[in-house]
Image (cartoon, coloured by chain):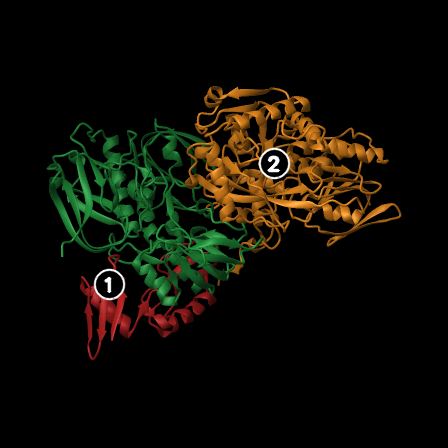
Chain colours: A red, B green, C orange
């Protein structure tokens, strides 16, 4: 089976062809990251999730957050539920862990912006 | 008040220009920012993917911005928030206002324009139909969702596959809305590849090329849109209309550099980019007024904005210190055969520090082409491209040495088909 | 119980209300919409017609000329933008020139001052961007432009200052007489009044039927407009008409009092009174019509397009009469209705008086409005003064029109203030500019919510179902 995909490791966007048999053969990539990306996409696709979390006592109502590692793609909506449940307390700094090891994925939900007390 | 350097705009462009000017010996710098915090539009771009070129890592918008803000704070560069520039004269006289200082009159030795861009609206597209609530520019929706914590709708159609539209398709989906489709007038996307993959394909959101919205329905709140296929001249094809029920239409149909102040200062504007003509140091047609970032031409990667803005900051510093020589040999740049525009527009090689990164956009999707740069008949650069698209900016770096050897009055950038 | 109830808060209803507020009369204005001027008044050419167009002897002609003379004074009194820019009726052929002579003579008979027929050379020296095939024009120096909804809002606000009550979001469902009193049933309860004025615009025929007046119909006629960026606002300085044909008055090209340029309207009869949608064909017709008069109109400069609906009476003339004892119709006030309305008001008040309404002039009538000036229009000293009093005048919310937070708060908190995003836009222009609210709309929602002490979710664009936000995230 040959799967076509666009590499998104960098803005170049190489058009990849991935042949999945006993081994996985990737063509069309200009660098190693392309091969890695394609292999992951067919075996265990992962994404970084970015979202926001409500803040209490801050100078603004929300702080932006992300998973500090890629998480399995099929867990995105479950993780969103966790993100939507939680509230952060101001002040918040970039990198502050808002949820540790979310759903056992090994990834933390961390703040990506600063919120002062307000 | 008198200042050496005033930077209009505290987004990524303004911040980078300020840092570079400071590094080059200018201490009297003032950044004027109209929002309540520095960082510009990056503050609402909470998705990641910023900084791959500059920092070799994937940052979110606020993180990317904060790195520059921290540096501005560390170096003690002065800035005023909540401050709007009302007037700019070609004598570099600025009138600005904010609630704290009231009206301010500032005379600057040099000015950097970094006002960014704004979104095209429904009005500019002249879409027929009603004018209900529920039609938003993607950026306005992004502000509501990411900054203020409000949802703008439940069933969403997005017109235009610009990056903000794609990003908002994913954001709205993750926040529980149903994004029905993205409709794109052109036969290709104007957004980045990775956004199409990660924002649409990941969530099975259809992307319809060569389609547009031909009518807006709903008296008070949007109730639906009629979409239709368009022909090669982008005219809707009769009989292809389809009604799509939705309560929200997001528009991601292009960005326009915000050059109201530039026009007021009599700066020459390039009709192709809607931004100022600039030279090797990002100086505009008005002496001592520099420009960088999306106010010059709309970028898709902030990294390039930063690079370009470092150059403007350096240029402004050279100008203030009197080290910027204008009497040397100068030639223009030009895009032909598939190259829609090139920035910068003219080069005086003696002012170039190391090299110049030329930014350009192609006018259509091409495969297997060479991007070539010619000085007269002499090809001075050639690069093979498998795939180029108007949605993704191309760049060509030429060293000072190469530029010094240019003989003609014009450096011509073009695409040529690769002979098979 | 009120002395007078006025149904309709458009330019006609607010003009009459303001006129009545000069007297010791208790008065209520009822409108189905949640703001003044949300019907035909909102989407209107904004032209103060000189008065050569309406046929001599008609009510249209009479009130047009009278109204035109009154306009400048009223606009000055209420601080509403008004500009006597003059208007031109273009002729493209000898036949057109004959028609223009007819209009000239009609104008003289109607009593219009400062009319002149000019030749091509003079015409092109006045307006160099006109098409080359013009042959001459009728030049009416008394033609003027105004912001129609700003005037209606100012009239309403001034009436309110002088004691008139306004019941907005109030739909009249039934009107009948009981013991010589009008009983007006609405979704907001029953209102009783001794006298009734029908200024219900597109729906005036329905009210007339309820009153048992002699039947007439209001035929809704759509007019589509394109509004152009201020960058091209000076392509013409006068209002440019075309010689009317049997197909209609033709498309206008005119500057607005705020420096934009508009092109329109076309004229299409419709079945539905509340259909304010634009059509592809209509917008194309409008642009084509504009191009017939003016060179170099570029659709790329359009910032918005919209539709207005004219309340065209089946009788051909304004319907100003007495449908039943103690009531007055002010109906079918189509073009030149905006101009005529200010003259219709004292006439209607007079009709009420003739039927027995006692009019004693108030000693404490306030003729002017306070604090109406936008920050951007203030002198340097006024700016400094207002900034001292309220620093929020230093925060620009609408970047395109340079409207400050202070301006917006004032628009919300004044009598009959803005409660919606469009209400703010109509009063102080935030969102009227080239970005059409792209930047400022979220901020305006925030300010409205704060000032009205409600959640942003409750803020609407215009009428009650035009919600902007659907809930909180998370």
Chain of the residue displaying label 2: C
| One can see residue A117 in this view | no
Q: Secondary structure at mark 1?
A: strand
Q: Nearer the viewer, residue C260 or C106?
A: C106
Discs 2, 1: same chain: no
Quarter of the figure that contains the N terminus of chain B: top left
Residue A3 image offset from top left, x and y in percent: 26, 71
Quarter of the figure that contains the C terminus of chain B: bottom left
Q: Secondary structure at mark 2?
A: helix
Residue C342 higher or lower than B61, as above or below:
above
Please name the residue that numbered disc 1 is placed on. Answer: A15
Residue B358 image offset from top left, x and y in percent: 22, 44
| One can see residue C275 in this view | yes
Point out the residue furthest to the bottom here. Answer: A22
Please name the residue that numbered disc 2 is placed on. Answer: C148
Point out the residue furthest to the front here. Answer: C95
Left or right: A33, with C267 as reference point: left
Residue C473 image offset from top left, x and y in percent: 49, 61
Q: Which residue occupies 39% across, 31% down?
A: B264
């Amino acid at each position: 089976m040959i799967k076509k995909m666009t590499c998104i490791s960098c803005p170049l966007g190489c058009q990849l062809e991935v042949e999945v048999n006993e081994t996985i053969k990737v063509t069309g990539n200009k660098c190693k990251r392309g091969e890695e990306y394609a292999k992951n996409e067919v075996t265990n696709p992962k994404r970084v999730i970015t979202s926001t979390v409500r803040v209490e006592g801050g100078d603004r109502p929300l702080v932006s957050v992300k998973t500090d590692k890629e998480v399995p793609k099929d867990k995105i909506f479950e993780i969103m539920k966790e993100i939507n449940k939680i509230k952060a307390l101001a002040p918040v700094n970039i990198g502050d862990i808002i949820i540790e090891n979310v759903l056992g994925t090994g990834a933390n939900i961390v703040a990506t912006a600063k919120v002062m007390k307000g | 008040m008198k200042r050496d350097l005033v930077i209009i705009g505290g987004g990524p462009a303004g911040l980078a220009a300020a840092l570079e000017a400071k590094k080059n010996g200018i201490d009297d710098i003032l950044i004027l920012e109209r929002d309540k915090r520095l960082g510009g539009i990056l503050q609402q771009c909470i998705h990641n993917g910023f900084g791959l070129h500059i920092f070799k890592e994937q940052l979110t918008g606020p993180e990317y911005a904060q790195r520059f803000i921290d540096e501005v704070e560390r170096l003690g560069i002065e800035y005023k928030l909540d401050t709007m520039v009302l007037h700019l004269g070609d004598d570099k006289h600025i009138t600005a206002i904010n609630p704290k200082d009231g009206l301010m009159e500032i005379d600057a030795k040099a000015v950097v324009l970094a006002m960014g861009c704004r979104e095209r609206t429904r009005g500019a597209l002249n879409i027929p139909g009603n004018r209900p609530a529920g039609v938003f520019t993607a950026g306005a929706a992004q502000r509501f969702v990411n900054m203020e914590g409000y949802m703008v709708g439940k069933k969403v159609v997005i017109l235009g596959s610009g990056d903000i539209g794609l990003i908002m398709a994913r954001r709205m989906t993750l926040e529980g809305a149903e994004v029905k489709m993205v409709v794109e007038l052109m036969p290709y996307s104007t957004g980045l590849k990775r956004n199409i993959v990660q924002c649409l394909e990941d969530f099975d959101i259809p992307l319809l090329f060569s389609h547009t919205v031909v009518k807006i329905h709903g008296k008070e709140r949007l109730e639906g849109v009629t979409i239709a296929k368009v022909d090669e001249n982008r005219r809707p094809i009769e009989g292809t209309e389809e009604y799509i029920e939705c309560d929200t239409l997001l528009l991601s149909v292009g960005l326009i550099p915000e050059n109201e102040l530039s026009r007021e200062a009599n700066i020459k504007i390039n009709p192709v980019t809607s931004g100022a003509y600039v030279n090797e140091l990002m100086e505009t047609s008005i002496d001592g007024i520099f420009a960088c970032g999306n106010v010059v031409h709309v970028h898709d990667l902030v990294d390039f904005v930063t690079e370009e803005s470092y150059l403007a900051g350096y240029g402004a510093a050279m100008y203030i210190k009197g080290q910027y020589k204008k009497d040397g040999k100068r030639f223009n740049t030009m895009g032909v055969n598939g190259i829609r525009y090139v920035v910068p527009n003219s080069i005086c090689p003696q002012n170039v520090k190391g090299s110049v990164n030329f930014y350009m956009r192609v006018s259509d999707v091409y495969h297997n082409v060479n991007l070539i740069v010619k000085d007269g008949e002499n090809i001075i650069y050639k690069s093979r491209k498998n795939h180029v698209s108007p949605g993704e900016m191309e760049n060509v770096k030429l060293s000072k040495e190469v530029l010094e050897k240019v003989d003609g009055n014009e450096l011509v950038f073009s695409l040529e088909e690769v002979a098979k | 119980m009120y002395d007078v109830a006025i149904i309709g808060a458009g330019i006609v209803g607010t003009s009459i209300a303001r006129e009545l507020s000069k007297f010791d009369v208790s008065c209520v204005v009822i409108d189905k919409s949640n703001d003044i001027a949300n019907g035909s008044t909102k989407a209107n050419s904004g032209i103060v017609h000189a008065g050569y167009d309406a046929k001599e002897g008609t009510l249209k002609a009479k009130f047009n000329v009278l109204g035109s003379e009154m306009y400048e004074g009223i606009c000055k009194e209420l601080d509403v933008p008004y500009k006597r820019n003059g208007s031109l009726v273009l002729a493209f052929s000898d036949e057109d020139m004959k028609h223009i002579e007819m209009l000239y003579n009609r104008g003289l008979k109607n009593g219009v001052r400062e009319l002149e027929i000019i030749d091509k050379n003079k015409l092109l020296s006045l307006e160099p961007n006109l098409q080359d095939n013009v042959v001459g024009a009728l030049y009416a120096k008394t033609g003027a432009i105004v912001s129609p909804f700003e005037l209606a809002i100012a009239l309403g606000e001034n009436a309110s200052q002088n004691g008139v009550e306004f019941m907005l979001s109030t739909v009249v469902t039934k009107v009948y007489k009981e013991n010589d009193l009008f009983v007006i049933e609405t979704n907001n309860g029953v209102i009783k009044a001794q006298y009734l004025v029908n200024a219900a615009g597109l729906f005036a025929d329905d009210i007339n039927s309820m009153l048992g007046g002699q039947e007439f119909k209001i035929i809704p006629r759509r007019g589509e407009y394109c509004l152009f960026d201020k960058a091209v606002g000076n392509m013409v300085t006068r209002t440019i008409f075309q010689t009317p044909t049997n197909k209609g008055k033709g498309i206008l090209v005119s500057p607005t009092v705020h420096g934009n340029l508009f092109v329109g309207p076309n004229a299409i009869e419709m079945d539905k009174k509340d259909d304010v949608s634009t059509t592809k064909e209509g917008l194309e017709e409008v642009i084509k019509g504009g191009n017939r008069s003016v060179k170099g109109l570029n659709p790329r400069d359009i910032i918005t397009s919209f539709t207005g609906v004219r309340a065209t009476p089946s009788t051909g003339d304004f319907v100003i009469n007495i449908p039943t004892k103690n009531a007055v119709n002010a109906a079918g006030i189509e073009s030149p209705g905006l101009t005529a309305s200010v003259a219709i008001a004292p006439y209607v008040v007079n009709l009420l008086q003739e039927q027995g309404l006692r009019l004693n002039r108030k000693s404490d009538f306030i003729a002017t409005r306070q604090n109406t000036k936008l920050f951007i229009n203030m002198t340097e000293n006024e700016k400094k003064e207002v900034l001292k009093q309220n620093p929020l005048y230093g925060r620009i919310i609408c970047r395109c029109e340079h409207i400050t937070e202070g301006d917006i708060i004032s628009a919300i908190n004044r009598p009959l203030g803005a409660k919606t995003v469009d209400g703010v836009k109509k009063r102080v222009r935030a969102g009227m500019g080239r970005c059409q609210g792209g930047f400022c709309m979220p901020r305006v929602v925030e300010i409205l919510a704060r000032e009205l002490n409600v959640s942003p979710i409750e803020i609407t664009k215009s009428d009650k179902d035009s919600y902007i936000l659907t809930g909180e995230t998370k």
